[in-house]
């Protein structure tokens, strides 16, 4: 059994991530996981969105939201590094001192992909959970609360010989996530009580 991300983080040195090959790219399935989430899924996560490395949107065309270190233990202690899929939601602040450019659609429960690990291509020194919500936001939302439900595993963490190969895999990750979430047992989780739904907002 592969060590969890947290166990890997405790090792004196991390094992090198395998390098993506053309054969891996050709053999990638377009849908992953069983017909309904299996253990350890679903995994709930929540935390205030932090500033990351700033390269997701600029360098890769895939803006990500970083969760704080203390909020990722629910997944890092039970799952290995890699790319995952599920749903996420940005929570509107109860009060704000500035006018938000986000709209109602930006606060919906939306499909997401998440990278858990060290991003070997960029040689990160710290374990991170970076979430890309598949939605075009009108502005950033640093400091806002994000809630996520991780529902399945897509692929292992890989290293790349080029940025183009990484971008290609990221685009495939998005398609695989959408295909995998487009099943009734997964779509049910859009109404999970973990999220800030209309029926639960009065309780928050």
Image (cartoon, rainbow, N blue to C red):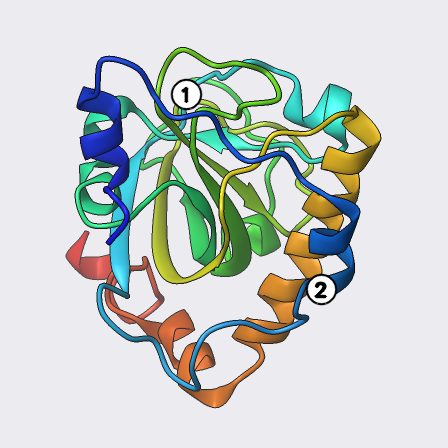
Camera-side residue: 176 or 200? Answer: 176
Q: Position of residue 137 (x, y in %)?
A: 66, 40
Is 17 placed left or right of 164 in the picture? left
Is 31 placed left or right of 123 in the picture? right
* Residue assigned mark 1: 50
Number of other residues with Cα within 10 Å of mark 1, as a class: few under 14, some 14 to 19, many 20 or more: some
Residue at left offset 54%, top offset 23%: 120
* Residue assigned mark 2: 27
Camera-side residue: 73 or 153? Answer: 153
Q: Position of residue 112 (x, y in %)?
A: 53, 53
Q: Position of residue 21 (x, y in %)?
A: 72, 43
| Upstream in sequence: badge 1 or badge 2 | 2
Quadrant location of the N terminus?
bottom left
Camera-side residue: 80 or 108? Answer: 80
Image quadrant where residue 56 sits: top right
User: In what element is the residue under mark 1?
Assistant: loop
Residue at left offset 19%, top offset 49%: 78
User: In what element is the residue under mark 2?
Assistant: helix
* Eye-nearest disc, 1 or 2: 2
Residue at left offset 52%, top offset 26%: 119
């Amino acid at each position: 059994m592969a060590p969890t991300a947290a166990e890997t983080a405790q090792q004196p040195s991390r094992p090198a991530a395998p390098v993506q090959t053309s054969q891996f790219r050709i053999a990638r399935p377009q849908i992953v996981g069983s017909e309904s989430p299996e253990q350890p899924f679903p995994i709930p996560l929540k935390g205030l969105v932090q500033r990351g490395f700033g390269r997701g949107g600029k360098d890769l065309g895939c803006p990500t939201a970083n969760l704080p270190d203390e909020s990722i233990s629910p997944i890092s202690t039970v799952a290995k590094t890699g790319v995952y899929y599920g749903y996420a939601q940005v929570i509107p602040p109860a009060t704000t001192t500035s006018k938000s450019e986000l709209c109602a659609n930006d606060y919906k429960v939306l499909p997401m992909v998440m990278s858990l690990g060290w991003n070997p291509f960029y040689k990160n020194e710290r374990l991170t959970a970076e979430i890309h919500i598949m939605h075009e936001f009108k502005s950033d939302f640093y400091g806002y609360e994000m809630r996520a439900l991780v529902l399945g595993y897509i692929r292992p963490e890989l290293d790349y010989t080029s940025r183009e190969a990484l971008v290609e895999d990221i685009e495939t990750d998005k398609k695989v996530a959408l295909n995998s979430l487009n099943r009734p047992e997964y779509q049910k989780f859009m109404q999970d009580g973990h999220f800030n739904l209309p029926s639960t907002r009065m309780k928050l």
